[in-house]
Image: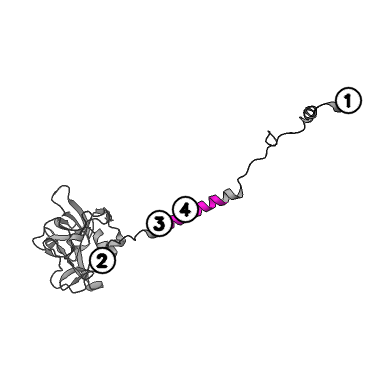
């Protein structure tokens, strides 16, 4: 039938329309995937960012380490009271120590093992050197908010413990610092001196020539030298 081929091409398109579907039509479209070149670009950006961060970190000057001594708040205090109660403990004193001007707010409770070595009458009313920012401890069930410093030498039964001495003219609340380095004394101390830092300080906090020293330098308060009592041997540790 020759007349059947006299139709235009549009006729053939209409006949094939139900069979041919565009690539992007519903049900036949393929999900597009990121090209490999895009993935490579993302990886390159991440590597470049990490490299820049590493260079920035390396270019920063190292932070100067702070001497642990500057973290320890060593303060002149006055023992207002030292209780010795055998029903509570046969080895400890429970003390009230004034470390500032306000007798209501600036009193610390201190539980100390000095009872075996220091008479009560030699402790009450005494100016002492304390560290007041150690972690609060519990001793024999009682809270201890500070520590009274003392010298210690010898071992075992022959151990000798005596109070650290501050100048008679010292004022309650004075801070200890290294001789000729008052400018390095911190304006504020951390709320807590970590125990590991205090252990580092104690390693070189010793008596030399009758004076308290730290790393071979004299420890002082504004009114003079911090010292050991008469007869304390060189090398006695302060703790």
Whole-number angstrom distance, CA of label 1 to CA of label 2: 115 Å
Q: Are marks 1 and 4 in contact (CB under 8 Å)?
A: no
Which residue extends farthest right?
1
Q: Residues within 10 Å of mark 4 (few under 14, many from 20)?
A: few
Q: Which mark is residue 202?
A: 2
Residue at image mark 1: 3
Dividing the picture into quadrants, the one containing residue 54 is bottom left
Most foreground residue, 49 or 72: 49
Residue 235 position within the rendered picture, expressed as x and y whole percent measured from the top left: 21, 73
Q: Indicate which disc, 1 or 3, sits on the residue closer to the N terminus.
A: 1
Residue 174 position within the rendered picture, expressed as x and y whole percent measured from the top left: 15, 57
Residue at image mark 4: 49
Task: Assign the N terminus to one quadrant of the image.
Answer: top right
Which residue extends farthest top?
3
Q: Indicate which disc, 3 or 2, sits on the residue closer to the N terminus.
A: 3
Residue 108 position within the rendered picture, expressed as x and y whole percent measured from the top left: 19, 53
Residue at image mark 3: 56
Q: Which residues are magenta?
A: 40-55
Residue 37 shows up from this direction:
yes
Q: Residues within 10 Å of mark 2 (few under 14, many from 20)?
A: some
Q: Which mark is residue 74?
A: none
Most foreground residue, 171 or 119: 171
């Amino acid at each position: 039938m020759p007349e059947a081929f006299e139709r235009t091409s549009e006729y053939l398109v209409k006949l094939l329309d139900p069979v041919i579907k565009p690539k992007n039509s519903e049900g036949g479209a393929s999900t597009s995937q990121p090209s490999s070149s895009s993935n490579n670009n993302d990886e390159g950006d991440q590597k470049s960012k990490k490299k820049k961060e590493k260079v920035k970190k390396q270019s920063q000057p190292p932070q100067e380490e702070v001497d642990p001594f500057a973290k320890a708040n060593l303060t002149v205090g006055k023992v207002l009271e030292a209780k010795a109660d055998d029903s509570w403990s046969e080895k400890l004193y429970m003390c009230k120590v004034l470390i500032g001007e306000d007798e209501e707010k600036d009193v610390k409770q201190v539980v100390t093992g000095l009872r075996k070595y220091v008479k009560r009458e030699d402790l009450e009313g005494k100016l002492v050197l304390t560290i007041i920012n150690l972690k609060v401890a519990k001793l024999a069930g009682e809270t201890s908010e500070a520590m009274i410093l003392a010298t210690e030498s010898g071992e075992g039964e022959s151990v000798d413990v005596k109070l650290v001495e501050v100048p008679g003219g010292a004022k309650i609340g004075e801070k200890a610092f290294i001789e000729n380095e008052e400018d390095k004394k911190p304006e504020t101390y951390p709320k807590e001196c970590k125990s590991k830092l205090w252990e580092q300080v104690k390693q070189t906090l010793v008596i030399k020539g009758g004076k308290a020293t730290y790393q071979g330098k004299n420890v002082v308060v504004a009114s003079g030298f911090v010292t050991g009592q008469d007869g304390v041997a060189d090398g006695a540790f302060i703790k």
